[in-house]
Image (spheres, rainbow, N blue to C red):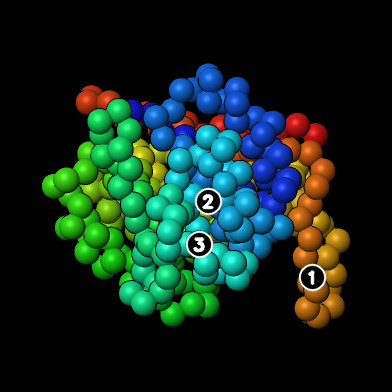
Amino acid sequence: MKFLIIGDVIGRTGRNALKEFLPSLLKEEQPDLVIANGENSAGGFGITKKVYDELLSLGIDVITSGNHIWDKKEVLKFIDQEERLLRPANYPPSALGRGYGVYTKDNKKIAVINLMGRVFMGIPLDCPFRKFDEIYEELKDTVDYIIVDFHGEATSEKMAFGYYVDGRADIVFGTHSHVPTADEQILPKGTAYITDVGLTGAVHSVIGMKIEEPIQKFITGMPIKYEVATKGFLLNCLIVEIDETETKIKRVKLKKE
Ligand code: FE2
């Protein structure tokens, strides 16, 4: 089974980068399931129904998210109905939407679980480690694969989580920092792991946003509105292939200035 995993898609530029690179990537790699983090795919903050439908039409099967999932208020109207849109599972149980889903491809059941870290995230969520344990117990006898998007800022928290679930999850990929890490690897008990897949968006940006505003914010300390950067296309993704004897992990970066 082959999985194509795309990190945070940032605004229209990110969607255009998908349009630029995804058709040939899908043709070449023939993945069985495509996952992308879409929490900032609409205008750089949040997701709308129109953008959600657009991402699905491009060939993405499951859309994960994180702290920005609630930024566009209309998400509250459709998140409960859309089985292919996930928000972190460790939000309180009363939060709208779902934290994991099970998807069938080629007669195999694939669970995708979305979790969010608690370090430097500013949101008092339930423990993602214990939440994984709970979901794992529920799913382990009925699914063939378990994939986790761990949305978090601290590399240490993501790495600790990777080792914590090693041998239980098949893939753990990190999102949220928008910067790819070069630590893709197979952990000792077989889990394919990367700390952060990195963004899909503009080539030159500050985590997907136009460069000038973040510089001004750091210089003045004053709040400033960010806008999605528009120049060039960059797609960061991960390809994981799992068969009975081996798991292979490959990081791919496609860029057009
Ligand atoms: Fe995020």
Q: Nearer the viewer, mark 2 or mark 3?
A: 3
Residue 208 screen position, x and y as percent: 71, 53
Residue count near mark 1 (Cα–Cα under 10 Å), binned few <14, some 14–19, many ≥20? few
Respond yes or no on whether mark 2 lies under 8 Å from ligand 1. yes
Quadrant position of ligand 1: bottom right
Q: Position of residue 234 (x, y in %)?
A: 69, 39
Q: Position of residue 223 (x, y in %)?
A: 78, 78
Q: Residue at x 38, y 62 (%)?
A: 98
Q: Which residue is mark 3?
A: 78
Residues 125 and 119: in front is 125
Q: Which mark is residue 225?
A: 1
According to the picture, the residue beneath numbered tag 2 turns out to be: 37
Q: CA distance from mark 1 to mark 2?
A: 22 Å
Q: Quadrant of the image for the N terminus?
A: top left
Asked which secondary structure carries label 3, the reply is helix
User: What's the residue at 36%, 77% (across, down)?
Assistant: 94
Circle 1 or circle 3, nearest the eye:
3
Q: Quadrant of residue 237?
A: top right
